[in-house]
Amino acid sequence: MSVPAELLYTQEHEWVAIAGVTATIGITDYATQQLGDVVFVSLPDVGATVTAGEPCGEVESTKSVSDLYAPVDGEVVEINEELDDDPGLINAEPYGVGWIFKVRVADGQATGTGLLSPTEYDTLIKSAG
Amino acid sequence: MNSTVRDTPLRSVHERLGATMTDFAGWLMPLRYGSETAEHNAVRTSAALFDLCHMGEIAVTGPEAGAALDYAVCGWPSQLAVGRARYTMLCAPDGGVIDDLIIYRQAAERFLVVANASNTAVVLAELRSRCARAEVADETAATGLVSIQGPNGCGLLATVTDIPLAGMKYYAGAYGTVAGRPAWIARTGYTGEDGFEIFSAPEDCEPIWDALSATVSGGLPPAGLAARDTLRLEAGMPLYGNELSLDVTPYEAGLGRVVRLDKPDDFVGRDALTARAAEGPRRTLIGLLGGSRRVPRHGYAVLSESSGAPVGTVTSGAPSPTVGRPIAMAYVEKDAAGPFAVDVRGKAEPAEVTELPFYDRRK
């Protein structure tokens, strides 16, 4: 199960790549293996405000549907439009072309607050079996 | 909990194939090997292999076996010719469905009853109590079951079996060999495609699986329980625990044809089923096509689109690879009229009523 060392993670199996004030967000390899084939992602609108720990979208797969949680506070600045035609990109490359949305992190929030390190996330998924 | 999970005889095969395994009715079974959508499509367009060793096999034997089964189930097994099979149900005295079954007549005095894994123990107990005139034996642990399903399945299986398949009817079976191993080979399945189910000794499952796999260069694709569920749903086939339960009779499920009220002798549930046949089903099983990409799933409420009032419940729902839209089966109140919507996590999504099945290979 791939857990890239350069990313941060959430308990809800999102990954976050923070560059400056922009956080790029997707779901982890572990999440895709739990979900199976992703068939639809419902995303927040560009310009929407999201709050860390709150649902901001849904990931539909063959067997189930899961909430997509915002890992940080901020404003949605971009969504991955390719997923509308090809949600399977999330399964194919969860950390690459399968990224889901980008957030401009709110002022005053220390980047990475409350997120898990790769080591912590790896422990989490191993304990989940 | 883990200590009670049973292993299929093909576990090492699934591990080699990198399957994601899941606890299903007390068995550790393959959920998917890679993409369940690709596995689903392989069955629709070519063929794929399934491990069904979790299914329950119960033999009912003896001179009175047919008559005993006629009393136990709502079908008419004694009328089956040797080598034929029938889909039937085991009902409670009030007509509720205890399990849906396939019964094969393997010999004049031998019937093989195939039950759902989750219900094998209760089916066995009921058959033992209802079939006092016959021998009832649980053969689950002594039986392995591998299935090849899909339009190419017949041609591929034909290369590794010693019996002619082309003339075998749907819902028929015969003794033969596969990869040289003795087997009961039946033209049955749960996918809506042509296909075969191969019952053998558990230790023969792996050579049978390997021989079937080798009929295609690069290996015949395996398919897991996730694909099995979307395949049966597209085919409009009920799943016990979803469309079938003790709370419904076969009539609610639209399967009144399996109840043989025309058989002469008494059977468990006859009075209740006779009454239900006369009064009509209390709920209606309908097919729904989702109007958005959000998927109606098991347990979601079906609403009257105009009033928003709940009128039923989704029993099974999934994104359909073949239809390209979400599909669902649902029970609605018998006088409920569409148009309907489904409460998909707090938002009413329109859903269009469609005839079952969603997919019919003959069309």
Image (spheres, coloured by chain):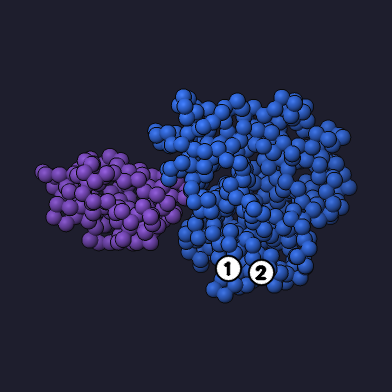
Name chain B's colour: blue
Q: Give the label on residue B318, or none.
A: none
- Residue that badge 1 annotates: B220
Label 2 chain ID: B
Q: In this view of the protein, which residue sits in the foreground, B316 or B67?
A: B316
The residue shown at (60%, 69%) is B213
- Tell me residue B27's x, y (percent): 57, 51
The residue shown at (84%, 36%) is B263
Q: Secondary structure at mark 1?
A: loop
Name chain A's colour: purple
Viewed as shown, does residue A49 lie left or right of B233?
left
The residue sitting at the right extreme is: B63
Q: In this view of the protein, which residue sits in the foreground, B219 or B318?
A: B318
- Tell me residue B184's x, y (percent): 75, 60
Q: Is residue B296 above or below residue B21?
A: above
- Tell me residue A100's x, y (percent): 30, 53
Label 1 chain ID: B
The residue shown at (30%, 61%) is A96
The residue shown at (48%, 42%) is B290
